[in-house]
Amino acid sequence: MAFQDLTFEGVRALIRVDFNVPMTQPAEDGSRTVTDDTRIRAALPTLKHVLDTGGSLVLMSHLGRPKGHDADLSLRHILSTLEGHLGRPVKFAADCVGDEALEVTQSLAPGEVALLENLRFHGEEKAGDEFFAGQLAENGDFYINDAFGTAHRAHASTAVIAKFFPEDKAFGFLMEGEVQALEQVLGGAEKPVAAVIGGAKVSSKLAVLQNLLDRVDKLVIGGGMAYTFVQAQGGQVGGSLVEPDMHEDALALLEAAKAKGISVHLPTDTLCGDGFSPDANQQTHPTNAIPDGWEGMDIGADSRADFAAALAGCKTILWNGPMGVFEFDRFAEGTNHIAQAIVQETAAGAYTLVGGGDSVAAVNKAGLADKVSYVSTGGGAMLEGLEGKTLPGIAAIAEG
């Protein structure tokens, strides 16, 4: 059943959210302030649906990587931000299990909200401890997972807990959207299908590329990883980022793509810098003839045109990873050009998924996030999903 069709009259909804948000350094009094509330805002539709249909909320999340209890990483710091978004007070439980949690969660009335303390203050969370998961489960009547960013982790709160709610469990809106986006791209996408894969290293994207070979018609490869492919074919790439130990894998991938009739597009020209700096001097060189003392920082004008032409007319497009060092404005043109090309194809009717931290940051920076079909918040979870791996947080509900 779709989450929209569920109602929560008199039900305590125990929701795994992802409130792992950036914050200021601790002030003199130890307080910290949320600096980017994107993840909190992303959870609001799910939270408001439960409240609007008569339920109460018990929210659980991790924050940072504590080693035991750490006051700097207490979820208490996000209370005021959360209360502002929900427009109501939020009760705080000083622990996520045991009496301190149950005293708060067992007495909740409809419309009330409780936030549990940081799950990772307990080592049992990351260990996927079943007893700990059972203790967490005592805090609610119905389990909802809306934390796609941790869906690839078999932790107590993301996967193991679901067995304590054999019938009463669901994805929230955010998780539902991410699962549907993955299925749309991997499960039977409308053709022609193109994947634009960028980022720094072949080694971090090889499994994604291999999994996509059975699903795409066109493969566009940019970013730092492109230079390993070019060097493997005998090109001179100057001081560009390369992984010589990935040459054989890169060549094998190109051969496999050719055998399947996939058109592969690598950059033919490169905007280079004479150092890794936002103020570096710039020259454009053929990607296979970059002189010593220069390194590839972005795709060149010819490559931008070629990549955009490759995407024209595609019905499904996946984008994961930038085309260059987009954090430096003078080397962001290639990434921005691809973003604009994907927006253009979206307007023409294509389904477009932007997944992966840096490409998401790129479309946000360009102000184009609302002009593509779906922007994933998942990062590592989306990457593992694109690799074809089973995500424990999804399987616990979809298959349980």
Image (spheres, rainbow, N blue to C red):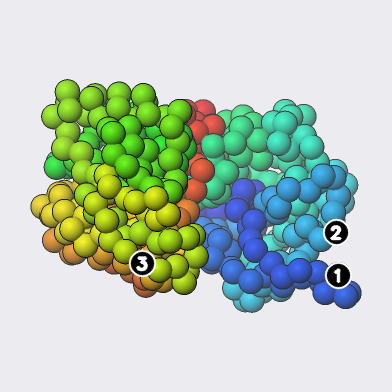
**Can residue 360 be seen in the rendering of this structure?**
no
Which residue is disc 2 drawn over? Answer: 71
- Report x, y in % for residue 142: 60, 44
Q: CA distance from mark 2 to mark 1?
A: 8 Å
Choose the circle earlier in sequence order: 3 or 1: 1
Dot 1 lies on which element? Answer: loop
Q: Residue at x 68, y 62 (%)?
A: 113
| The residue positioned farthest toward the left in the image shown | 313
In the picture shown, does residue 208 fall above or below 28? Answer: above
Q: Toward which corner of the image does residue 359 lie, by quadrant?
A: bottom left
- Report x, y in % for residue 326: 41, 63
Q: CA distance from mark 3 to mark 1?
A: 45 Å
In the picture shown, does residue 21 fall above or below 233? Answer: below
Front residue of 130/362: it is 362
- Report x, y in % for residue 243: 45, 36
| The residue positioned farthest toward the front in the image shown | 292
Kindly report which numbered mark, 2 or 3, lies closer to the viewer in this rendering: 3
Dot 2 lies on which element? Answer: helix
Instruction: Identify residue type, mark 1.
Output: Gly
Front residue of 109/98: it is 98
Which residue is disc 3 drawn over? Answer: 282
Q: Residue at x 15, y 50 (%)?
A: 310
Label drawn at residue 30: 1
Q: Are the two marked residues, 2 and 3, in contact with CB atoms closer than 8 angstroms? A: no
Choose the circle earlier in sequence order: 2 or 3: 2
Instruction: Identify residue type, mark 3.
Output: Gln
- Report x, y in % for residue 67: 82, 44
Q: Is residue 93 left or right of residue 232?
A: right
Q: Are the two marked residues, 2 and 1, in contact with CB atoms closer than 8 angstroms? A: yes
Instruction: Please identify the quadrant where the N terminus is shown.
Output: top left
In the picture shown, does residue 350 fall above or below 336? Answer: above
Instruction: Identify residue type, mark 2.
Output: Ala
